[in-house]
């Protein structure tokens, strides 16, 4: 792909989606180290000293932070096959921003563990925990990321329109679209400033996640447009998409349930409960599927994709 200006060929086709999303990413640049975490530490310690049921929440929080941190790390590592498969500088430019952003998301969670989780554990006289502790991870989660990596790596040896749709369905629609966007929405609703007063407010976590969610909106929109192209222009059967999702959705559900595993009555928790998360995930997923499979519908514009609801 090359741009044309006044009939003359130039490097970049500015109307291409890959380039437009690249530009949006550059303009919305943020630094994980600019986020203030002091109040998160204070609020967590204060909350723990006043509430005996803290362990339920700290455990849920640590499981969530560990799985999201490792998830961001995995998607950073796994993305490269798309960069090799794509043609055209505009899509290549977009992928460089996505890889950089996934690395920043990883860094944010690593920093949060070092600068919030560890000092809080220390203050409370608890043993320092590791985000790598296998106890924080559900079997469904491990399986989901193994399959995602495999679907992406397949492009290196067998790059077909069908395999591209399968890879995007794993990476952009399921891991980012369903698991991450739902989990980040849930964490925001639970720990935001005007959320439930029965739980510690974590303004730094909420701010970091807002930046991440906005980036993820752009990533998911890019993947959706690629899947739509695969179905409409390359003739990939819609069943390929539906079957892939049907295999993966139970793994996502298993992961969400794992977070609440040790909670006696999840319906009573402050913030959204597992049922709210499931309805949010389903509603968003159905919207996206409609935009992908309905010929008359289109992928939302970049402002809508990066906006937070
Ligand atoms: Fe990410
Ligand atoms: Fe992402």
Image (cartoon, helix red, strand yellow):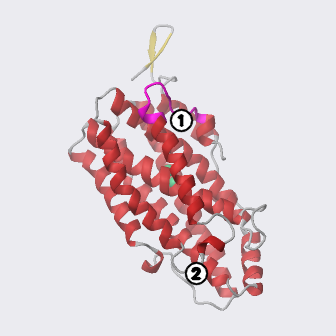
Identify the residue at horizontal 56%, vertical 65% (top origin). 274
Q: Distance between the residues labelled 2 and 1?
A: 44 Å
Secondary structure under badge 2?
loop
Instruction: Provide the residue span drawn in magenta.
Output: 291-302
On the picture, is 169 further left or further right than 45? left
Residue 12, how many percent across, how many down?
47, 24
Q: Does the magenta stretch include residue 63?
A: no
Q: In this view, does 105 lie above or below 5?
A: below
Q: Quadrant of residue 37?
A: bottom right
Residue 133, how many percent across, how many down?
46, 79
Label 2 residue near ligand 1, CB within 8 Å: no
Q: Name the residue under label 2.
A: 264
Of label 2 and label 1, which has the lower sequence position? 1
Residue 46, how many percent across, how many down?
77, 81
Identify the residue at horizontal 24%, vertical 38% (top origin). 160
Secondary structure under badge 1?
helix
Q: Residue 21 carries which label?
A: 1
């Amino acid at each position: 792909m090359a741009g044309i200006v006044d009939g003359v060929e130039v490097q970049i086709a500015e109307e291409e989606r890959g380039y437009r999303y690249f530009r949006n990413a550059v303009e919305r640049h943020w630094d994980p180290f600019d986020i203030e975490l002091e109040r998160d530490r204070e609020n967590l310690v204060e909350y723990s000293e006043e509430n005996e049921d803290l362990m339920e929440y700290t455990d849920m929080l640590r499981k969530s932070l560990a799985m999201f941190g490792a998830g961001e790390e995995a998607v950073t590592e796994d993305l490269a096959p798309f960069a090799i498969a794509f043609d055209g500088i505009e899509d290549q430019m977009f992928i460089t921003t996505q890889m950089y952003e996934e690395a920043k998301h990883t860094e944010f969670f690593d920093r949060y563990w070092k600068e919030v989780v560890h000092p809080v554990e220390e203050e409370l006289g608890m043993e320092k925990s590791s985000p790598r502790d296998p106890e924080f991870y559900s079997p469904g989660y491990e399986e989901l990321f193994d399959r995602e990596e495999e679907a992406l790596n397949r492009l290196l040896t067998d790059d077909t329109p069908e395999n591209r749709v399968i890879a995007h369905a794993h990476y952009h629609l399921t891991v980012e679209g369903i698991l991450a966007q739902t989990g980040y929405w849930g964490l925001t609703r639970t720990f935001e400033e005007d959320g439930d007063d029965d739980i510690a407010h974590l303004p730094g976590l909420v701010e970091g996640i807002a930046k991440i969610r906005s980036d993820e909106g752009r990533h998911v929109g890019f993947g959706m447009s690629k899947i739509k192209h695969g179905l409409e222009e390359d003739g990939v059967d819609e069943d390929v998409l539906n079957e892939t999702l049907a295999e993966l959705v139970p793994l996502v559900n298993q992961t969400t349930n794992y977070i609440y595993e040790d909670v006696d009555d999840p319906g009573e928790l402050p913030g959204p409960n597992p049922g709210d998360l499931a309805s949010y995930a389903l509603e968003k997923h159905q919207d996206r599927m409609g935009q992908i499979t309905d010929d008359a519908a289109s992928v939302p514009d970049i402002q809508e994709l990066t906006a937070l609801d």
